[in-house]
Amino acid sequence: MNYLSKPLIIILILGFISGLPLALTASTLALWLAESKIDIAKIGLFSLVAIPYSLKFIWSPFIDIYLLPILGQKLGRRRSWMILTQILLAVFLAILALAQTDNIFITAILAILIAFCSASYDIVFDAYRVEILSLEKQGEGVAMTQLGYRIGMIISSAGALYSAEYFGWQTTYLMMALIVASIGIVTVIIAKEPDESNSRNLSHKINLKSLSEPFLDFMKTKDWVLIILFVISYKLADAFIGVVTNPFLREIGFSKIDIANIVKIYGVVATLSGIFIGGALVERFGAIKIMFIAGFLHAITNLLYMVQAEVGLNHALLATSVVVENLTGGISSAAFIAFLGNLCSRNYTATQYAILSSMAAIGRNFLAAPAGYVVKTLGWYWFFLIAATLAIPALIILHILNKRIMKSRL
């Protein structure tokens, strides 16, 4: 394995750009809003700005198949669209940096636009990664993508909090825009356009029947509605807690540096460790068993935040909670990703995986929206108790699926 080859280094950097915007419209933005004295209930609603990540499968066929190389044949289709989405990302991040966060409507619109551009970039980048690498290099490409993505999330979460502490929020968001506009675009320019990208027949008309086939094929799966309900609900507890965690920690006395050090850095390291551990466990015991055990343990570890709400400012307790929560979350995520992949028909893997991953994002983007209102109404202690119980329906559905249709497949 040569992870230092030019194509894989380029994929690492492009994966970094992919991971950068998510926190800037989610947890990092939530903390900026909290410090701007925005009501916690309204901050909770900001989980809805990530809707494009849930719906990107709708326009992905048009970007992936039908759109022309708008910046010229020399750049090609994939690089043209990566550069365009990066330019738009940088522009909207810069505008958000200069906007006033007390205008909640403008902030929400800009955050949605950033999420839309980010989701569109992900569509093109995923296609680029698959097309530029040979079949035997695909696994290495996924590994480099995940590494870059996580680095991007660290920079836009922990890195952004460090920067905001010393330079302020506006400067921080301008720096993020500059990173996208420089590192991202330069990398795309020096990258090679895949041969497959421009060799397709781009003059054919859109065939609605061909676009619907992956959906119809998935609906032939036994208990497909139950599967969708499980996919939507499995990570709901995480989403419910995640959308208000930073404001909670600030409210009980943790500084931005504390959050950057403990929640972001420790959390990412624990998550990556959990993913590697989870992958090994899935290979030995299967995805469903690990999803059930890790999902249950993860729900239990979320209860540590109830203790944090009672104890208040305690760094050791927070570090323990973050490491245990993210470790079990990483294990359950690895099993969940393997589960989604095994659900897909081999004839429609890309499209059906996009559908399932979009359904998984619904819990994060839609169903977590009332989190702020629950906090405001019941307080932090009861909020964390309710959030932990949200894992129960998914575990019940998983048990039913395991008994009815999955034993022979996973």
Image (spheres, rainbow, N blue to C red):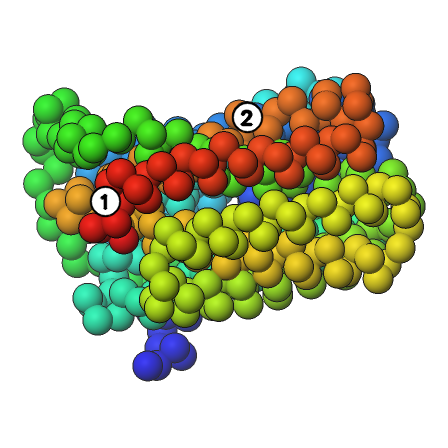
Tell whether 155 sits left or right of 246: left
Check disc 2 and give the amino acid type.
Leu
Q: Nearer the viewer, residue 399 or 364?
A: 399
Q: CA distance from mark 2 to mark 1?
A: 25 Å
Disc 2 vs disc 1: Cβ atoms closer than 8 Å? no
* SS category of the residue bearing label 1: loop
Report the residue at 84% width, 62% height from top.
Answer: 316
Report the residue at 73% width, 41% height from top.
Answer: 245
Q: Position of residue 37 (x, y in %)?
A: 85, 28
Quadrant assignment, res 215: top left
Check disc 1 and give the amino acid type.
Cys
Q: Which mark is residue 344?
A: 1
Q: Which mark is residue 57?
A: none
Residue 319 appears anywhere in the view: yes
Report the residue at 41% width, 50% height from top.
Answer: 336
Report the residue at 44% width, 33% height from top.
Answer: 232
Q: Position of residue 178 (x, y in %)?
A: 61, 51
Q: Nearer the viewer, residue 67 or 32?
A: 32
Residue bearing the label numbered 2: 367
Relative to 149, say whether 133 is above or below: below
